[in-house]
Amino acid sequence: MEETKKIESMNIYEKLSNITNEIKAVAKNLDVGVGKNAYKAVGEADVLKAVRELEYKYRIYSYPGERRVIDSAILETEKEYQGQISRGNQLYMRLEVEYIFVNIDCPNETVKIITYGDGVDTQDKGPGKAMTYADKYALLKAYKIVTGEDPDQNPSPTNSEIKGETPKKKTTKTEEEKVDYSKELEKFIADKGLDKLKICTKYKLNKTSKQEDFKNALLNLKVEVGE
């Protein structure tokens, strides 16, 4: 009873701080993609499981207050398999979400954060994927939830190490200079079924662009699609 009264007397920042302090790390248990494009990610169900009990304990209610479509497009895809080329369309959508945290004991006390989510799907699941991504990361960032090893504990980890994949051979400067990032970017766009023209326009890429330009575009694009 005494603990309940103490929690009820807390302001919203005290409650959020206590949740952050008590919440456990969430493992990357979700397998995304197949083959060479596969990677580990944090599942929405695991995040909700970690957050729900503590929000109930500290009497916090969180929810997406408003969603806004800030970008959308129909992406034309082209894939080659055993000499046969197949074409199709994918719906791409980017949402901006205002996520709200409310102190149940004092509903006028709220904290709002802005988060974003992208979704791509061949049918009607694009918006759902975007909402799931945005909501999941709103909770991850608001409560500072750890999802893996701290990258600062090790010098310059690779993307594969952060994702929990088998570390690859460390690239030397000489080897890196041999990488054709224009081809790497083109392959990534094809593998993900993205719109090449739209991406080249966005990152101002053309025949005169330098390898560093293609490299930066590739790295930014990987962040955008959640790799």
Image (tube, rainbow, N blue to C red):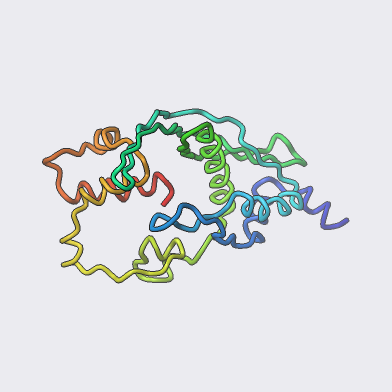
The image quadrant that residue 100 belongs to is: top right
Splitting the image into 4 quarters, where does residue 175 fall? bottom left
Q: Considering depth in this image, is 76 or 173 the residue closer to the camera?
A: 76
Towards the viewer: 7 or 26: 26
Considering only vertical position in the picture, is 74 above or below 172? Answer: above
How many numbered discs sit on the rendered protein?
A: 0
Image quarter (top left, top right, bottom left or bottom right) of the N terminus:
bottom right
The answer to whether 201 appears left or right of 16 in the picture is left
Name the spot of residue 167 as percent of width and height, x first: 38, 69
In percent of width and height, residue 106 lies at 74, 39
Furthest-left residue in view?
Answer: 208
Residue occupying the point 73% across, 53% down: 53
Q: Residue 183, how many percent across, how many down?
A: 21, 49
Between residue 13 and residue 142, name the one nearer to us. Answer: 142
Q: Residue at x 34, y 47 (%)?
A: 191
Q: Residue furthest right?
A: 1
Q: Quick one: 83 or 193, which is closer to the camera?
A: 83
What residue sits 39% from the left and 44% below the top? 224
Q: Position of residue 195 (x, y in %)?
A: 32, 35
Residue at image coords 57%, 46%? 136
Task: Answer left or right for 218 relative to 1.
Answer: left
Could you tell whether 185 is left or right of 222 in the image? left
